[in-house]
Image (tube, rainbow, N blue to C red):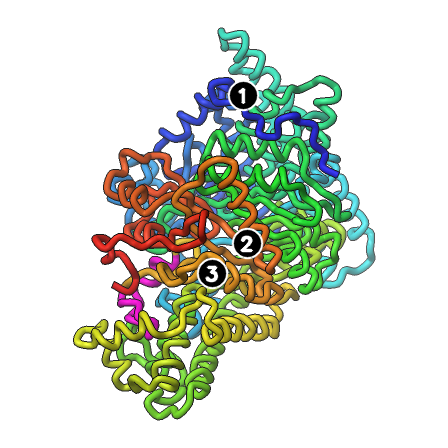
Amino acid sequence: MEQVSHQNIRLSEYTLEELPLLKRLKDGVLKAKPEVCIERSKYITAYLKNMSSPEEPVMIRNARAINHYLCNKAPMFFDDNLIAGTTSSKFFGAPVYPEFNGLLIWPEVYTISTREKNPLLLKKGEADELNYSIFPYWMDRTIHEYTRKRFNNPDCMKLFERLVFFLAGKAVCISHTVPDYTPALEKGVEYSIKEAAAKEKEIRSRDTLTAEEKKSLEFYISVQIVLQGVIAYAGNLSRRAASLADDEKDPVKRKVLKEMSKICARVPAKPARTLREAVNAIWIIQIAIHAESINIAMSPGRLDQVLYPYYKQDIENSKITVKEALELVGCLWLKINDNTNLVPETAEELFGGASTVPAVTLGGIDEDGNDAVNDLTYIMLRVTELLMTRDPNVNARYNYKKNSYEYRNRLAEVVYTTKAIPAFYNDIAAIETLVNQGVKREHANDYAIIGCVELASAGRSYDSSSSVMLNLVSALELALYNGKRPATGDEQISPETGDPESFTSFEEFRQAFIKQLKWLMGQAIELHEYFGMAYQEVLPSPLLSVFFKGPMESGKDLIFGGALYNASGATHIGFADTVDSLSAIEQAIFVDRVCGFDELKKALKTDFTRHARLHSYLINRTPKYGCGDPVSQGNASALILFLYEEYQKHVNYRGGKYRPAYWTMTNHAGQGKIAGALPSGRKAGKVFASGITPASQVADDLASCLKSVARLNTLFIPGGLALNLKYPSIYGDEDIKRFSDAIEAYFRYGGLQVQFNIMSYEMLIDAKNNPEKYPELLVRVSGYSAYFKDLNEEMKNEIITRTEYSLRNGAATRFRDQYKGMLPYA
């Protein structure tokens, strides 16, 4: 039964004009220029250089460094937001994490403010501090360099550093997870400090300690240290708010500041009693977690569920109105937007335009399997609709057996309004996928989205979901060129699997591809394991561990496998391009026999110059994924099954399995730019298809496209997927119903996830040519949203050329001839 009392679930009577605070705050956020923030790096580095002892255990030493930073972190109040605290010392900051990815900007500390694409402001004095004081200390201490030295610069590290085969998430971050803030709201972090102190005392009472018990002792000591830092930061905020209130002339602002001072003096140390206290506590904890873990995909989870008891109680006791709740949630949404990634210029082609992707998950069912949609769900949807900010990454669960059609259609309306958010998730498929991974059903029922599209049981499953990002096309090219790849020249990269010109059957080529893929997967997994062991030795996570079930009970940090579930995620780039190329080889060489491998490779090496007839054949006459062709569907399903079975054979350093996924951020653009021509007919240097989406302009019919994706067994995709669809427009209630009916049909057929851009070819081309006309245009990339103007040229072209479908008849709209040069086959 829905816990809904709103007479109008659209909450359409509440506009930004009716919520002037949110309108004013949003304007400020959108105008803000990103700045590099060195605050964290300065305090962490100073402590480790000058105040710590090398005799201390690593976990305790790092915990003291985090405590030192939080105790000294400046309590900033930049605007009239009702929530206290900031991720960085800047209004819109890109924090420097020198132990993770910070040193990547070292070559450009004096030019990052003026670079052409996505500049980040950095003051000269702060640049000097990074250049002469902070970065030199970390030169051989980053997790990347530590791993290289610790494992003698292994071959898998060298392969990763080529960037064209796979990416290793742990080289630059440890995040991508969903903490559970509920216990902290119900009991306060002081309770966790007392719990850790009692555990410490109990361990110390033992006569002798095993190595495992000594680690647990260090863990419980570290927990107390970091949580005391969290409370100290909240205290700083409280005192600063009180001081500002004393000087404030405006009585309304003075009242707000005094209230914030009282709230921060209480939470998150003590239990939250109201919605205002709960929201402030969550934000302070989120800030604190980013003191320890980098600000990438640290996802707050199911906030409509976590915060609903406080909202319900406040409404019943007349402590808050719906309007005030909208205002408070809006303030949280805008606070979540106060930070961005520190992306070096060299990585703009791979990650340009990406946000920090903190995912919020709404709706679905609860642990007991009951309808979980509530009043706060609709409030959060209305805030998302009004603000249309790129963060948080809002995701909507829909259970067609338990959730109402009114809820389903409301989700569709929000997508229509925002043009891009939220993404839709099929509860039925997602829950069964997690149960198949050994997750208890009640825990699977409580899943939330990590970052882009990854599935996790909130606060129970430490998934490290971006551990591996593997380029499938690289394995295909290694098979075509017998262990070599055009992007790396004549160098023998991988084991020889035979010259394809000697193959007499498609199965022989497929086996060569599988061997290359298996070898590449092995290299990526080996490096991930090295990184994981390095983290265990030098960068444990006691603060993050507090907000998961398992670590406090076992005395085991997350990085040592303390969570209830301990998967690692491996996502894949170039899925559709690889499937289409396999199908093209099968059809062209072994069925129709229009060419041999010798002619095909000559055509590929020349980017189809003087091979126009073959190129036309490959584009138009070979099976394409997304069209329902049995050959292509068979190759797609076989690849999904192989990757699933192969990954599941591996156990990670925390005792969990590897979970394959299919989302690509903007990597399909960057990786496509450095790939040669493909048997599918795709030209050299063109972007790959995003996520698990069919290649642009391939699937002519919406139903065939949806069925092709839905036929891929989602039990074999436990890490999640991103399916990108585009409609030019939606008009009125009839179209809204068509839109949501199509989503439900796709879900009933087995589809796991889908996301949309509601915009036409013409609109996107105009936005590319005239960015000043579309400063706030949000687009769905591959699992998250970004401002279109911030994307690189290749990524803009990929979004423009995605197939556009008519809602009325499901037919693909013909792409304009004058822009065909943007297409991957042109």
> As rendered, which of 117 and 284 lies closer to the eye?
117
Q: CA distance from mark 3 to mark 1?
A: 56 Å
Which residue in the protein does label 2 denote?
A: 753
> As rendered, which of 678 and 742 lies closer to the eye?
742
Residue 267: x and y in percent read: 66, 29
Q: Which mark is residue 240?
A: 1
* Residue at x 36% of width, y 29% of height: 31
Query: Mark 2 and 3 residues: CB-CB less than 8 Å, in contact?
Result: no
Q: Amino acid at mark 3?
A: Cys
| Sequence order check, earlier mark of 2 and 3 | 3
Mark closer to the observer (2, 3): 3
* Residue at x 56% of width, y 55% of height: 746
SS state under label 3: helix
| Sequence order check, earlier mark of 3 and 1 | 1
Q: CA distance from mark 2 to mark 3?
A: 13 Å
Which residue in the protein does label 3 denote?
A: 705
Residue 341: x and y in percent read: 42, 45
Which segment is the magenta one? 667-684
Q: Amino acid at mark 1?
A: Arg
Dot 2, crowdedness within 10 Å: few (<14), some or many (≥20)? many
| Sequence order check, earlier mark of 1 and 2 | 1
> As rendered, which of 663 and 133 lies closer to the eye?
663
Residue 325: x and y in percent read: 61, 24
Give the dominant element type of the magenta stretch: helix, strand or loop. Answer: loop
Residue 763 is a magenta residue = no
* Residue at x 30% of width, y 54% of height: 815
Dot 1, crowdedness within 10 Å: few (<14), some or many (≥20)? many
